[in-house]
Image (cartoon, rainbow, N blue to C red):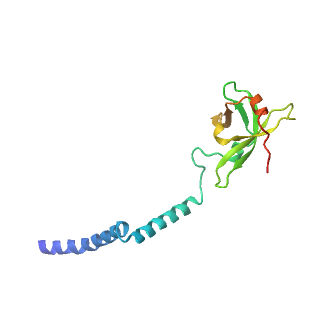
Amino acid sequence: MKKLTALILSATLAPALALGTVALAEEYGGTQAERQDVSEQRADKQRADDQFMDRTPVGALYAADVIGKTVRHRQSGDDIGEIQDLIIGEDGRILGAVVKTGGFLGLGGQDVSLGWDHLEHTMGDDESMFYVDMDEEMLRNAPEHERD
């Protein structure tokens, strides 16, 4: 009876162990070219998975969260301009923002471009807020942004 049980058990486990060994060999074995091919297939699958988003990634912003928002001086909290547009590089990264300096009753002022890393973004009362270390006078004296 013990021999029969051992025979049945080994007949049941042998195929499972063989398949597991093949899977491990496929995963870690093979030639360099085969391993490279598996790696490329995984990268293709990851890119396909990243093609669509079903929610906003943590910390991400929509353009509407940025354009039209007031820029404030970090120390004083004074309003010094409003973000008019975003400057996006060839690689898709945001490089900067075009800020309209304050004028009188919405008239006057000028467009100045600031590097994105010079703007500090925070959230206050569920609204995006932007701060810079420059005051309004410094922005008014900056070269005007010319759109090509």
Say above or below: 70 vs 42.
above
Give how far across and how far down residue 145 sits, in percent.
78, 43
Q: In this view, does 138 lie above or below 34?
A: above
Residue 103 picture quarter: top right
15 or 58: nearer the viewer: 58
Q: Quadrant of residue 10 in the image?
A: bottom left
Q: In this view, does 7 lie to the left or right of 42?
A: left
Whether 78 is drawn above or below 21: the answer is: above
Q: Give the left or right position of residue 120, taking residue 86 as reference.
A: left
Residue appearing at x 66%, y 42% in the figure: 116
Q: How many labels does the image show?
A: 0
Q: In this view, does 128 lie above or below 34?
A: above
Q: Report x, y in % for residue 15.
A: 28, 74
Q: Where is residue 17 in the image (x, y as percent from the top left)?
A: 27, 70
Residue 121, quarter of the rendered image: top right
Residue located 72% across and 34% down the image: 71
State the residue lying farthest toward the top.
76
Decide if residue 1 is in sight here: no
- Of residues 94 and 105, the one nearer the viewer is 94
Residue at position x 55%, y 63% from top? 48
Q: Give whichever of 65, 4 is nearer the camera.
A: 65
The answer to which of 77 and 9 lies nearer the viewer is 77
Which quarter of the image is occupied by the N terminus?
bottom left
Q: Is residue 13 visible?
A: yes
Does residue 125 appear to the left or right of 108 in the view shown? left
